[in-house]
Amino acid sequence: MSASNGKSPPSSKPTEPGFSTLSIHAGEDRQKIAHSLTDPIVCSATYTFSSTQAVIDFIQEKQPREEYGRYGNPGERVVERKLAALDAGEDAVLFASGMAAFVGLLMAKLSAGDEVIFFDECYHRSREFCTKHMSRFGVTTKQVKTGDYEAMAAAITPKTKMLISESPTNPHLSVVDMERFGALGKKHGVETLIDATLATPYNCRPLSYGIDYVLHSATKYLGGHNDLLAGVITGSKEQLEAVRKLRGIMGAINSPHNIYLLERGLKTFELRMARHNANGQAVAEFLANHPRVSKVYFPGLETHPYYSVAKQQMRGFGGLITFLVKDADWKATAKVVDGAKIARIAPSLGGVESLIEQPMVMSYFEYKPEDRARFGIHDNMIRLACGLEDTADLIEDLRQALEG
């Protein structure tokens, strides 16, 4: 503090805008077409050039404009810049869904003879794509116990090209030590991918820990209203160049209206996440003390095995909670799910409405019991995605469902 005028001296270092400021303004031009405040929806499958020379200039100078709808859309560029800023990354590539983003990254980066290593707690469709489909093209998938870094290190060979994990994982909400995971990849010259859908950029930024790629299903918290599908990969511009080129071939793109919905959802991202975090924490604490609940998976509880690392890395813990109904078979557990009056029975998460489901029924019903047991999917397991309803109402709804 200056003694002469009582004012702080001007800072010589620029400060990063706050999270809400980034969510609202990052990636956007200050003055837009027709002087509009919001970015317009550009509904065009193709884009015109004024002359043949203009086409040549576009190609030779790599001008930042559109050519054909499969390669990009003006609104898409805005959303990609915004998402990159939120993740503190150089670039982002937007896809039609989270799975499309996952598939696009792996198809761009892996070749016959390569290997990938997963931590074994993961979205079952991600596992299925690698084990059933990438295997057809000569790519080998290895799985090791989540959190066992020694086992992952031991599984790495000269053929290993990528280490993959979610954090938190779905549905067990285990949390990866990002620094350790990233360092493992750097030590062995292997790229790393974290699916941070459940964390979101608001609660954790994996790129800052040395992770190469971050995946988000933007369908969830980023879109936030259960009304769109989208996915994104963030990272360095150089590393994502091949991913962007392959997306142009695959055509796994978003419609102009879908892009608009995602940009609009991002405007309130920080505000929504604060409420998701608060609801998740309060509901998890309620469940942890309820006599009909035998176990709660939520990284914000001190009883969670990854609480300490989650506390170090995460600003908050999101709105997703998994719990076990005490001494219940799958039918008794289904009665609890059916008893919820606020939460709707549905897959997905991250929207304003609370959703509830039984993983054994919703995602693993056709699996053999031994396979469900191997993946830690119990018959008495419930997954609750807390929305933005009043906290007291969510707790009362769960109480009556458990005790009804």
Image: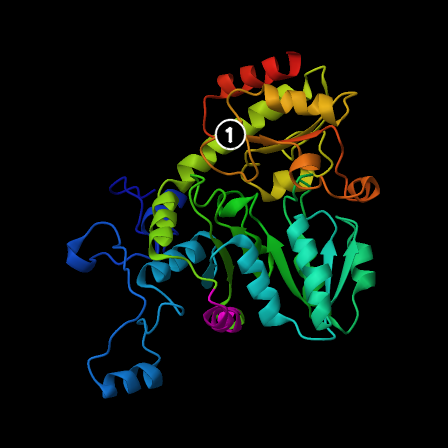
Out of 179 and 298, give the one closest to the viewer: 298
Q: In the rendered structure, which segment of residues is drawn in magenta?
A: 240-251
Locate residue 176, reporting x and y percent: 68, 48
Q: Residues within 10 Å of mark 1 (few under 14, many from 20)?
A: many
Q: Is residue 244 magenta?
A: yes
Q: How is the image coloured?
A: rainbow
Q: Main secondary structure of the magenta part?
A: helix
Quadrant that contains the N terminus? top left
Locate residue 273, reporting x and y percent: 47, 37
The residue type indicated by label 1 comes to: Ser
- State whether residue 86 is above or below residue 227: below
Q: Is residue 60 magenta?
A: no
Q: Residue at x 72, y 56 (%)?
A: 118
Quadrant that contains the C terminus? top right
Q: Which residue is mark 1?
A: 354
- State whether residue 11 is above or below residue 363: below
* Left or right: 285 in relation to 386: right
Locate residue 107, reporting x and y percent: 60, 69
Using the rendered image of the protein, determine whether residue 159 is visible from the camera's viewpoint. Answer: yes
- State whether residue 135 is above or below residue 232: below
Locate residue 212, reporting x and y percent: 59, 63
